[in-house]
Image (cartoon, helix red, strand yellow):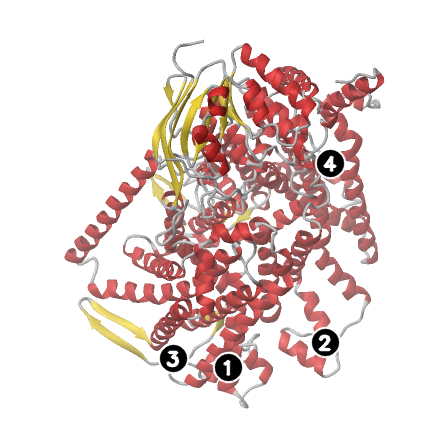
Amino acid sequence: MSDKPLLEVDSLYKSFGGITALDGVSFEVESGTLTGLIGPNGAGKSTTFNTIGGILKADSGTVRFDGEDITGESPDRIARKGLVRTFQMSREFQNMTVIENMMIAPTGQRGESALQSITPGLRENVSDQEEDIFEQAWEMLELFDIDHLALENAGALSGGQRKLLELARALMLDPEMLLLDEPFAGVNPTLEKTLIDRIETLRDKGQTFLLVEHDMDVIMEHCERVIVMHQGDTLLTGTPEEVQSEERVIEAYLGGSVA
Amino acid sequence: MSVQEGPVASRLPDSLVGYWENDLVKIGATLAAVYLLYVVAGLLLGYGLSGQLNSLRRLTFLIVLYSIGALVVNLHWGYSGLFNIGVVGFMAVGVYTTTILTRPVAGQNPTGTLPGLGLPLPIAIAGGVLAAALVGYLAALPSLRLRDDYFAIVTLAFAEIIRITAKASELQEFTIFGTTVGTGGGRGIRTYPNPINQFFEGTGAPIVNAVSGTIDGPLVSGWTFVLALTFVLVCVLWVIVRIVESPFGRVLKGIRDDEEATTALAKNTGSFKIRSFIIGCGILGLLGIIWQGSQGYISPSLFVPQLTFFIWIAVIIGGAGSNTGSIIGSILFVGTIYLGPGYVRRLVEEFVSLSGRATNFPDALGALAGGDISGIILYTLDQTSALRVILTGVLLIWLLKRRPDGLFGNRREMASSIDVESRVRDRQSNDSTAGGEE
Amino acid sequence: MKMYPHVTLGPIGTVRERLPFAEHAIKIAAIIFGLAVLFDMFRQLTTGELTIALIAGYLWRGLSYGLVIGLAGVGLSLTYDLLDFANFAHGDYITLSAFVGWGVAYLVAGFGQFKTGSLLFLGVGGTVYPQDVGISVTNAPIAILIGLVMAALVGALLAVALDSAVYKSMRGAGNITLLIASVGVAFILRYGAVYLFTQQTFGLTADSWSYKLGLPGGTVTITSASLLLIFVSLLMMLGVHLLLTQTKLGKSMRAMAANQQLARVTGIPSEKIIRRTWLIGGALAGIAGFMIALLQGTINYQIGWTLLLLVFAGVIMGGIGSVYGAIVGGILVGLITRVSLIWIPASFTEATGFAVMILILLTRPAGIFGGDVS
């Protein structure tokens, strides 16, 4: 583990028209950790993810990833640097099959060059890589227990299945850090346990996870650190125990404003 | 392999076996049905052998060309989500560039015609295709920022700018860097001789002579040209299938489905859109070269948005997102809507005796008021070009309401260079036979 | 293509809010270019290549042309804004209303002297000529006026009828589907016009009073047609302005336009508002069609279509979602296409309008009056 945090978010402000969505959010995430991001609805968690991920541009503030300033970079550049996010409303490709959704994910595919895909000699190289990508995708589908849906159009899946696909697909990018936006909503508890175990194994191998979840048990049992957001700002960060016992957190969730 | 393989299929690469099994048969069957329709019509109209062959030649000529156009529109819209309604503009760039490049230089051109740069035809064709691709690049740049309908307006604007430029009298004939070239302005310009015609007028003449007892001479080179065009279609299809069944094509599908999510998966979507657009526009340039260019004479009035929308409806009939659909859609469009009204008119004239002529609508109405319906019928039948477009419009609306996916729009056409579907089925059946459970 | 709440609803497809360096550069380049153009204009004035009269003539013709484009743009902008689709049939509403309006004008002017059918169909096939009927603003003002009103009525009815027949059942269909459907409608209308009137271009007006204004360098001809056009256009624009600010309907329309995002999320605008929007837009299209035919003195099946892309240009320049923008944008387009004659050959004037539109879409897609694009 390096001594500098992998992700540093510093004083992000973002407003839409008259509404302030982010009001100075700041936090850090250490490499190789499983960190939780919690807060009541409307606290700005998804907006934070959107801003970190490059889909939204903050009015002010910075985001640093692995020491590099990524504020305002385009989403594809950020993802290429190793910071990948999933969406709260899962955005699988509805008109493509599950297996295609998986195979599109890995970066640096030879076949993404039109020339290589067309030219007779070079296309064989592309197909070789396709075989590897297929194996990788199939393994992941089996792990997530959705391999039987491989040929279904992603749009035909149930809500929980789509969440699984979203997570599985994100993992295909082998990201250094993954921002997970409610990945277990609608997923059955047994499978949720398997996935959390899987995430923890990946964490132990060095991947970093920032997890937004409403299931407090998951957060408290598995996250090393928890960041609490409220009304667009960071309320506090600490270990699960510290956060659980903090009165301000309880008040925030019950709807009162916190001084 | 779980797929049955016949003698041809076993010699084909994986990705084509599926085609042979299904799609080629579908295309062939549709074509055969339309051919039959036309042969019957020809019989009823008293066409001899030459007449039938010519009728089918014209039919096939248009089908092949519309298919190429439809495949490009399908690549742009069905696969990449790029709404290109400036199709004719890129065709115009291709054929005008080739014409200017290949016409004889000043001094060697027949008097009274426009000079060009005198380059050999193959080089000129390459130049035309490149020019169309370049203009396609310029037109694609706005797509990076604009929503699809605004981008559509931009493509239409491009096509109109191109047409206006081709029509401009200032460019009709001009001298630049000491060379004189011209576009012909509003009057148009002669293009280039058809090498196939030239062959049959020269070395191939004996062949023509041999058959000229049974069929008309010009049919030989006419049909040979159509077969050559079919070969071009096959090549275009080959390229597009390889593009589409690959990781590149997969990303294009992702872009069409949800561009933002594709971006979140680390894909530089702008680069993919531009490449897809350029390739399509290059092919459109080639289309203009072999279509309007082969007719010997081009003018700006040939490149009007109406043609773009005819190609579009072929795609919509077949279903956006399916290459086979685009070809079948073209067969059906040309066979029924495009050439149909003309044949219906001829058939009616042949079999129904109608007298009287009405050259304009009020007179036809007047005749109707007087109890005579032949006036209005004859008038209506005369308006073939108007009928064709009106039918297209009605069909468009009906399709969009009832069958927006067209005939094949919701098929599964896997975007990979390997046969993913059969690999998946193998794994899935292994799982169930082994009683495996995760 | 999916639309998510945080994605903009104007021209920009994804939320790329930052202005890349290139965009700033283009804007600076555009300002420098604009200044250079003005500078050259003065230069040409001093050398005599250009005269006050010539400029005035361009401005006058550009203004007339632009007002028509602006009028047509109001209807296009309203429906684009309310129903979020580009109505490619709008040009053909213009054409058909113009044909009917002029047919009625002919009927009124030449009643009894010629066959009704020939008059209504503008003498298609060479049965009646403008000189025979002697129709012009000064000779037959009543006929012109009735024709104008007729054109507005037909435009309004046509728009509403087509909405009921085609677009109503497709309310949630998505902007591309509606666009393509409108292309289908456009085809039917345009070639319906060909069926009825053939592809002939009809001369419409006989000679009419005009005033030759003397200015340094020459004269500017001010036709009665253009005077009527300007008067009617300004009247219509005043009417639209009053409608938007004073009436309940207008206020609902403005509320819907301002709260696009909310409207999208909460649902589709009420059918009553939709119907009235089509009525207004269609009526203005009819007036614009009648006027452009009057201004040009000719009419054919394509006048609306050839105008349409310029109307789009005007609406885009002015900013989708703003009626005033559509008007200003239209006038700008008209002026650009005419004033550019100072530097650009006549063949390219329309292309200039399109080029400016493309440039605006690239640099400031929201247009001049476009609202907050986020």
Q: Is residue B169 left or right of residue B438?
A: left
Q: Please give the label number shown on residue B207.
A: 4
Say whether mark 1 and mark 3 are on the same chain: yes
User: Closer to us: mark 3 or mark 2?
Assistant: 3
Name the image quarter holding the C terminus of chain C: top left
Say whether mark 3 and mark 4 are on the same chain: no
Amino acid type, callout 4: Ile
**What's the distance in space between the residues labelled 4 and 3, CA to CA?**
65 Å
Q: Are marks 4 and 1 in contact (CB under 8 Å)?
A: no
Residue A179 coordinates in the image, percent (x, y): 51, 25
Point 66% across, 62% down: residue: B387
Q: Few, some or many C-alpha atoms within 10 Å of disc 2 (few <14, some 14-19, many ≥20)? A: some
**What's the distance in space between the residues labelled 3 and 2, CA to CA?**
38 Å
Amino acid type, callout 2: Gly
Residue at the spot of label 1: C106
**What's the distance in space between the residues labelled 4 and 1, CA to CA?**
63 Å
Element type at marker 4?
helix
Camera-nearest residue between C200 and B156: B156
Going from N to C along the chain, the mark reached first, 3 or 1, is 1
